[in-house]
Image (cartoon, grey):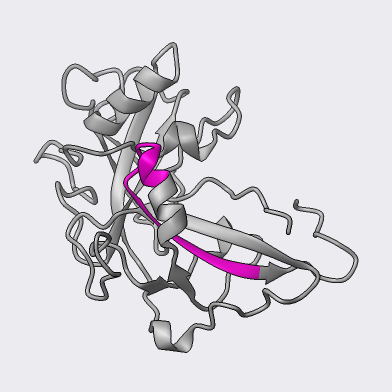
Amino acid sequence: MAILPRIPTVGFCLASGLLAFAGQSACTRADPSTPSQASPSYFSHSPKVCGIDEAREYFCDELLPRESALPAVPPYEDCPGVVDEHVGELDPTPTVAVFDPSYTEHIRKRQPPGNSCCYSWCSKITLRDPATVDPRAGCDDARAIRETYCLDEPEAGTSRPSPSPYERCPDAIAPPEVAAFYAPQGALFDPTETGTRRQRGFRECCYAWCSVVPQGGVSARW
């Protein structure tokens, strides 16, 4: 069965202009320790800890102006403290994203020459009742492909926990349409893919389902 390459997920970075769209392995925060801390003078969509059933999303840019009336906290004064041109996967994306020093440092170490400015915010995860999700839906079709979607582990946990040791991960969600070839109404937690991502250093929760390629093949956007 073919495996469809997945669009970078919640923790992705975007470098406009000269830089190409970066893959998830380079952009998702690996084993986060300290959530973002914004200056209290800024209107913050980036609290220190996201709430229950919320995932943190990220946006990074290399080509932001190097002078700002509202610079980020030291030693990142070359970055604006807030941006209003950012994109996310979970709706709704807030109108303002606040500078995230810990994620900026992480990305600068992974992507030389280290000029990235990164921002984060918390988005609500759309939950589903796992009893309403058929884990084998579409999988027996000859044109079926396996898709997965991963998001940052909710920092405050979830109201619908998966089995141990992944209690912070929701047991079923509605994957965002922008992150998949075909996003079903609901997808179940996938402990195998989650465990694989954890072994690579990414504290994520992953979900899997089967999509069916339409007659005539994949659409032009792929």
Decide: is 203 above or below 37. Answer: below
Q: Quadrant of residue 37?
A: top left
Question: In the rendering, at what x and y percent does residue 150 appear?
Answer: 44, 54
At x 22%, y 74%, the residue is: 159
Residue situated in front as seen by the camera: 35 or 195: 195
Q: Is residue 186 located in the magenta-colored stretch of the structure?
A: no
Q: Closest to the observer: 3 or 111?
A: 3
The quadrant of the image that shows the N terminus is: bottom right
Residue in front for this viewpoint, 88 or 162: 162
Please identify the quarter of the rendering in which residue 182 is found. bottom right
Q: Is residue 205 magenta?
A: yes
Where 83 sits versus 88, above or below? above
What residue sits 46% from the left and 23% below the top?
A: 62
Query: Is 120 drawn above or below residue 206 in the view shown?
Result: above
Residue 135 place in picture, x, y as percent: 54, 77
- The image quadrant that residue 102 belongs to is top left
| Outermost left residue | 40
Is any atom of residue 84 visible in this view?
A: no
Q: Residue reaching furthest bottom?
A: 132
The residue depicted at 20 percent of the width and 55 percent of the height is 50
Instruction: Please state the horizontal and vertical placement of residue 23, each as a whole percent of the image.
Output: 54, 36
User: Residue at the spot x=41%, y=33% of the render?
Assistant: 60
The magenta segment? 197-210
* Residue 12 in view, yes or no: yes
